[in-house]
Amino acid sequence: MENKVILLASDQLGKGDAELGENVLETFFTLLKQNEQKPAAIFCMNRGVLALTDQSLVCVHLKELAERGVPVLACKTCVDYYGVQDKLLAGEISAMNYFIELAGRHEVLTLS
């Protein structure tokens, strides 16, 4: 996991029921933060930026990962689109060019 960047493209995991998808995503990050190996970074884009707000229980886990030194980043274009600049409880705003840089150095694991 250390050499991976997680690309979080949604506030739920999978294409089925929304509530189930939110629960599955929360389970993923609960287990990830308990794992000894942490990802190189987590980059949130599209609806993934909503996971950094109080609209999602996942934000608690992402905040803990950030506090443990994992860069948790939100796509500026997506944050602006959803109007959540003042609602981010975890992570920091970043640019797509930084994600491209990360993707050039690490394997990307996409969650959508």
Image (cartoon, grey):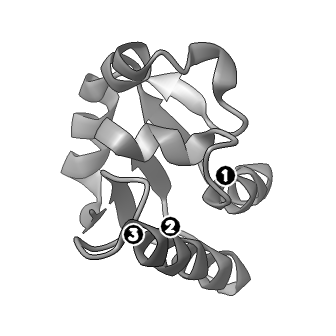
Q: Amino acid at mark 2?
A: Pro
Of circles 3 and 1, which is in front? Answer: 1
Q: Residues within 10 Å of mark 1 (few under 14, many from 20)?
A: many
Report, in whole angstroms, how far the alpha carbon at label 3 lies from the one at label 1. Answer: 22 Å
Q: Is residue 70 above or below residue 22?
A: above
Q: What residue would you read off at disc 2?
A: 39
* Residue 82 picture location, percent across and down: 41, 22
Q: What residue would you read off at disc 3?
A: 3
Labels 3 and 1 touching (C-beta < 8 A): no
Q: Residues within 10 Å of mark 3 (few under 14, many from 20)?
A: some
> Which is nearer the N-term, disc 3 or disc 1?
3
* Residue at figure coordinates x 34%, y 53% from the top left: 10
Q: Nearer the viewer, residue 32 or 27?
A: 27
Q: To which quarter of the image does residue 6 belong?
A: bottom left
Q: Is residue 25 shown left or right of residue 64?
A: left
Report, in whole angstroms, how far the alpha carbon at label 2 lies from the one at label 3. Answer: 6 Å
> In the drawing, what numbered circle is on residue 104?
none
> Which is nearer the N-term, disc 2 or disc 1?
2
Q: Is residue 9 visible?
A: yes
Q: What residue would you read off at disc 1?
A: 59
Q: Quadrant of the C terminus?
A: bottom left
* Residue 86 picture location, percent across and down: 66, 15
* Residue at figure coordinates x 19%, y 48% from the top left: 104
Q: To which quarter of the image does residue 20 belong?
A: bottom left
Q: Amino acid at mark 3?
A: Asn
Q: Nearer the viewer, residue 78 or 5?
A: 78
